[in-house]
Amino acid sequence: MAGLQAKYPGESEYLQAVQEVLESIEDVYNQHPEFEKAKIVERMVEPDRIFTFRVTWVDDQGEVQTNLGYRIQFNSAIGPYKGGLRFHKAVTPSMLKFLGFEQTFKNALTTLPMGGAKGGSDFNPRGRSDEEIMRFCQAFMTELWQCIGPDQDIPAGDVGVGGREIGYLYGMYKKLAREYNTGVLTGKGATWGGSILRPEATGFGALYFTQHVLHHAGKDIAGKRIALSGFGNVAWGAAIKATQLGAKVVAISGPDGVCAIPEGITKEMIDYMLVMRASNRDRVEDMATRFPDRAQFVAGKKAWSIPCDIALPCAFQNELSEEDAKELVANGCWCCCEVSNMGCQPGAIHYFQHNGILFAPGKAVNAGGVATSGLEMTQNASHISWTAMEVDDKLHTIMQCIHEQCVKYGTQEDGSIDYVKGANIAGFMKVATAMLEQGII
Ligand code: 2IT
């Protein structure tokens, strides 16, 4: 860690993600001198390669705009590079390195053969028209297409990149590459190679995992109050499944504040989350404006200020601080499953773990998204489409298997599960063993 800190000062998200994994695997690593001999850790923390490119496009006012684009191919030990694209104003190489690093372990947990990658741009979709989004995606792909391929690197969505963006990206890929293999991107539309349930998969998988965490602790999700952060694709899928399972979603949030929903979110409100996402306004207050009888907007507050049983961060890294964790617990919260990547700050995780709160990390909880991308790749490669029931069944099995891996590697002396350790060690063992078997490359 000291070496990495000196080498990459200021890459705080990347250093935070690496530190968490290294702390978890220390004991296991020391039991395997062959890992040390092959310098597995030193190799694993560095991306295989990073592409950086300029993206120039013209906005609706006719003004020329320039953004930066990236693709980080992190690790290919267990399969082709796989991971999402993030369009957000705060995107930096550090952010994408942390996400690519996490993706490598997460993808290993899914049981499917996928390596880790991440990419994106500092393009800010907020306030942009549909035409601007299209022109940006097209300009982005004029560079990206040369780095990707269905057996090489398969991007998908992440924050700021949903079905609409994947459509524009795929259209331009076809035109440039003159290749019509749908397997080059996942999260596509259902009529042109997309998997049924991919849009819902991250949220659904997160709730299946949460159910396993609760069952293992002798609890049930029905009737519980759930506070969600965000209102994008992940929060949307989580809200649908939580409601189906009989839980009550009592909060959603945005960069402008939180909407308290004391009676629980309804189907109409969940549908309206899609309208809010498509508007590019990036304001959760719109929910309270549209449903004033059910949702009360509080400006500047987070979802963690609303009393709940279960907290599900679904928005952005480091969105839940130690202070937030204390407020949640003081208000009765007893479980936090991270759905966003690295949604909790280290202080929050320590606070949860030291106060007996059930806690599970993003790379286990949210892996259903990329797992269903893997299922989309399988359908594309074999030119078939599975039914919703088939995809949902496979997603269920995968989330159960991820939970079993956490139990296998994370069970503590007192019988409780350290899900952070469990997920990190399980992912690490798979990637490290593959690297070892493939020699020094
Ligand atoms: O963080 C993630 O796992 C994603 N954004 C989904 C990646 C994917 O390839 O489906």
Image (tube, rainbow, N blue to C red):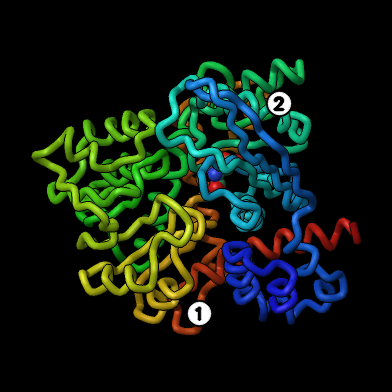
Figure quadrant of residue 239:
top left
Q: Is the N terminus in the top left, top right, bottom left or bottom right quadrant?
A: bottom right
Residue reaching furthest right?
Answer: 440
Residue 215 is at least partly visible in this image: yes
**On screen, residue 208 above or below 132:** below
Residue reaching furthest bottom?
Answer: 413
Q: Position of residue 142 (x, y in %)?
A: 71, 26
The residue at the point 49 percent across, 68 percent down is 419
Circle 1: element type? loop
Figure quadrant of residue 430:
bottom right
Residue flagged by tag 2: what amino acid is it? Thr
User: Which of marks 2 and 1 precedes in the sequence?
Assistant: 2
Q: Position of residue 196 (x, y in %)?
A: 48, 27
Circle 2: element type? helix
**On screen, residue 248 above or below 191:** below
**On screen, residue 348 above or below 243:** below
The residue at the point 31 percent across, 52 percent down is 228
Q: Position of residue 158 (x, y in %)?
A: 52, 41
Total numbered labels: 2
The residue at the point 65 percent across, 30 percent down is 56
Say if disc 1 is inside 8 Å of ligand 1.
no
Residue flagged by tag 1: what amino acid is it? Gln
The residue at the point 43 percent across, 24 percent down is 129
Please give the residue where the numbered disc 2 appears in the rendered image: 142
Say if disc 2 is inside 8 Å of ligand 1.
no
Specify whether 238 is left or right of 386. left
Specify whether 438 is left or right of 114. right
Please give the residue where the numbered disc 1 appears in the rendered image: 412
- Rate crowding at label 2 as few (under 14), some (14 to 19) or many (20 or more) other CA atoms within 10 Å: some
Return the residue nearer the eye: 298 or 350.
298
Q: Is the C terminus in the top left, top right, bottom left or bottom right quadrant?
A: bottom right
User: Separation of disc 1 and disc 2 at Cα?
Assistant: 50 Å
